[in-house]
Amino acid sequence: MITFNQQIAVEALGPNLYGSVMPPTSMGVLASYAYGGNTLAVAVNAAYQTVQSSFHLYSICGHFVRAAKTDRRLICQIERVRETRTFQTRIIRVSQEADDGSAQLCFIASADFHIEEPRSMVIYSTLPQTKLPLSDTVISLTAAQTPTEHGLYQNIERFLDMQPVTLAASTNEEVEERKSSSSAPSKFSAERFRAQTPLRSEAEQISALAFYMDKGLAYIPANHSGYPLTEASACASLDFSLRLFTHEIDLRRWHLSEATTSVAGNARAFSEGRVWDENGRLLASMTQQTLLRPKAGFHPRI
């Protein structure tokens, strides 16, 4: 059995060059290509190998260039573009060896690391819509806002415990009054999650969180609009921005995620996922613009 830290592990291949220890996994039965969160996690872990322990990742933004394959490992080339007393910046290019031996670029991103500052002018955190503490939330394995296609996440469920939280659509009357046929869905998906095995370092903790936060954001626009994923001819993440608000994370404890979509058009959609710890402190945000093409003959309900 492959453990979570093995799945996201990297090894040095040369100066500023790292390879994933394992080939990336697919998400589940709906796609044979690699799960994007696995590629992102390996990129984060590789970048961590090039900075001192006093620097902590707070932002990584980039693009998924092409889908990675699951039968070969990922190769990460790191470029050091900034080295100051308080910030270090890395450009990460993730590729795989093609069948003809050439390198095929799969992913490119910019990662920024920051020291722990001695003081803050303001300290606050927005609260989730889900009731806290997590131990009091209503857990359902068939929550209406969560994609329920059989086997959708079967390959990443080996590494994470994930329990959807039963929720209703927004009841804000002002929002409902302004809704029209072109309004974004007011639903949000929520679930609690934790890693199944220990993670030994900050690099592993943050890489594992990145692995999780890619989950589902490409599918939410269709799901929250009431369409099964089988109505789509293409559904994939195009770009992402992962922002971390602390490096003090322990994924062996339960965490809460909420995800929403805010705009869609031209076969693209924009969604955001957020993660809180069990005390309601916002830890991270992931935004993505995704490709969502309907199948031929698709007819929207509105």
Image (cartoon, helix red, strand yellow):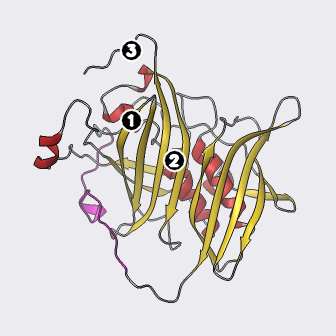
Q: Quadrant of residue 73?
A: top right
- Residue at position x 84%, y 29% in the image: 99
The foreground one among 243 and 198 is 243
Report if residue 7 lies within the magenta region. Answer: no
- Residue at position x 36%, y 67% in the image: 278
Q: Earlier in the sequence, mark 2 or mark 1?
A: 2
| Range shown magenta | 123-141
- The disc at residue 214 is 2
Q: Is residue 205 left or right of residue 246?
A: right
- The disc at residue 264 is 1
Q: Mark 2 near mark 1, Cβ–Cβ under 8 Å?
A: no
Which residue type carries mark 1? Ala
List x then y, in percent, for residue 13.
86, 56
List x then y, in percent, for residue 275.
41, 59
The reply to whether residue 218 is visible in this rendering is yes
Report if residue 132 lies within the magenta region. Answer: yes
Q: Is residue 241 left or right of residue 70?
A: left
Q: Which residue is identified by label 3?
A: 298
